[in-house]
Image (tube, rainbow, N blue to C red):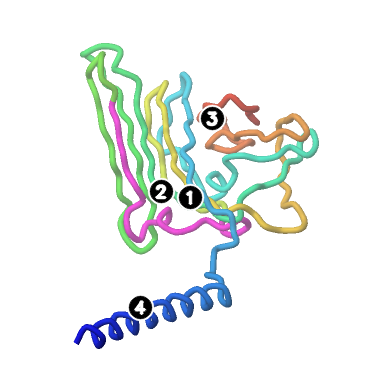
């Protein structure tokens, strides 16, 4: 009986060892697939100065150029092939007094359904108004923005009082092309430097300035 049990254990061990070797050989013969594009998520912060905004449109082109590489005085290269909004947070300044209010709001744009707005108001001199929101289902911002495609299409509208702060979290795919995709800016940047761009664009009003220790193209 002991001999049979010993043989049975040895047979199971041998079978397990052969299975392990087979799996190892399969992994060596066929490496797992992987995504070659460089894809990452980052949160950008923007600050508004003394100008409040009403129904200010942010389009696909704006979210595709949160940063650029300056090649010449008014010529820069794009870095992104695509971008998608993950979430957005906006904070007002505190109300100047209890008899007045500070308001922030985001209105997501849609083609196949109603526009969706999230807003908040404060009358507190200690606490700001705050909106935390993500693109609703079927909103335009819920889809990827692609470089060179419908860049003038608005994704959301901003309503805010002066001195507001906006955090925009993007999922991005780096551009992978042999020839740089260039963009002409009306303002100069430092050649060879990575420059962050105002949310409303390098040629826009510049209301939403990036909060960064790096160069800012505005």
Query: Depth-wise, is mark 3 or mark 1 nearer the camera?
Result: 1
Q: Secondary structure at mark 3?
A: strand
Quick one: quadrant of the N terminus? bottom left
All told, the count of numbered labels is: 4
- Image height of 160 relative to 65, above or below: above
Q: Which residue is mark 2?
A: 86
Mark 3, other Cα within 10 Å: few <14 / some 14–19 / many ≥20: many
Q: Quick one: label 4 or label 1, which is nearer the N terminus?
A: 4
| Magenta run includes residue 143 | yes
Viewer-closest of 114 and 28? 28
Q: Which residue is mark 1?
A: 171
- Verify CB contact (< 8 Å) between mark 2 and mark 3: no
Q: Marks 4 and 1, how far apart in space?
A: 48 Å
Residue under label 3 = 210
Q: Which residues are magenta?
A: 129-150
Check disc 4 and report the residue beneath it: 13
Q: CA distance from mark 2 to mark 3?
A: 18 Å
Label 2 crowd (10 A; few <14 / some 14-19 / many >=20): some
Q: Is residue 112 left or right of residue 3?
A: right
Q: Residue at x 52, y 73 (%)?
A: 27
Nearer-the-camera pick, 138 or 158? 138
Could you say whether the residue bearing mark 1 is in a helix, strand or loop? strand
Taking 78 as reference, is 5 above or below it?
below
- Above/below status of 134 relative to 1: above
Determine the CA span between mark 1 and mark 2: 6 Å
Instruction: Looking at the image, tell me whether mark 1 or mark 2 is earlier in sequence order.
Output: 2
Mark closest to the chain's N terminus, 2 or 3: 2
Find residue 97 and report its image quarter.
Answer: top left
């Amino acid at each position: 009986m002991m001999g049979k049990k010993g043989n049975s254990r040895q047979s199971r061990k041998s079978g397990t060892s052969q299975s392990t070797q087979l799996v190892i050989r399969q992994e060596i013969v066929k490496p797992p697939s992987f995504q070659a594009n460089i894809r990452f998520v980052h949160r950008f912060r923007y600050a508004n100065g003394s100008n409040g905004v009403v129904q200010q449109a942010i389009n696909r082109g704006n979210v595709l150029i949160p940063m650029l590489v300056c090649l010449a005085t008014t010529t820069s290269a794009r870095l992104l092939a695509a971008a998608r909004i993950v979430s957005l947070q906006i904070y007002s300044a505190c109300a100047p007094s209890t008899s007045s209010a500070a308001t922030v709001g985001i209105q997501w744009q849609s083609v196949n359904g109603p526009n969706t707005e999230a807003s908040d108001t404060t009358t507190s001199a200690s606490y700001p108004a705050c909106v935390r929101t993500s693109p609703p289902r079927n909103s335009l911002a819920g889809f990827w923005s692609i470089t060179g495609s419908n860049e003038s299409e608005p994704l959301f509208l901003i309503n805010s009082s002066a001195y507001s702060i906006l955090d925009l979290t993007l999922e991005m795919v780096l551009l992978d092309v042999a020839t740089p995709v260039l963009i002409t800016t009306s303002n100069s940047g430092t050649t060879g430097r990575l420059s962050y761009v105002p949310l409303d664009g390098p040629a826009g009003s510049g209301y939403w300035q990036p909060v960064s220790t790096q160069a800012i193209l505005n």
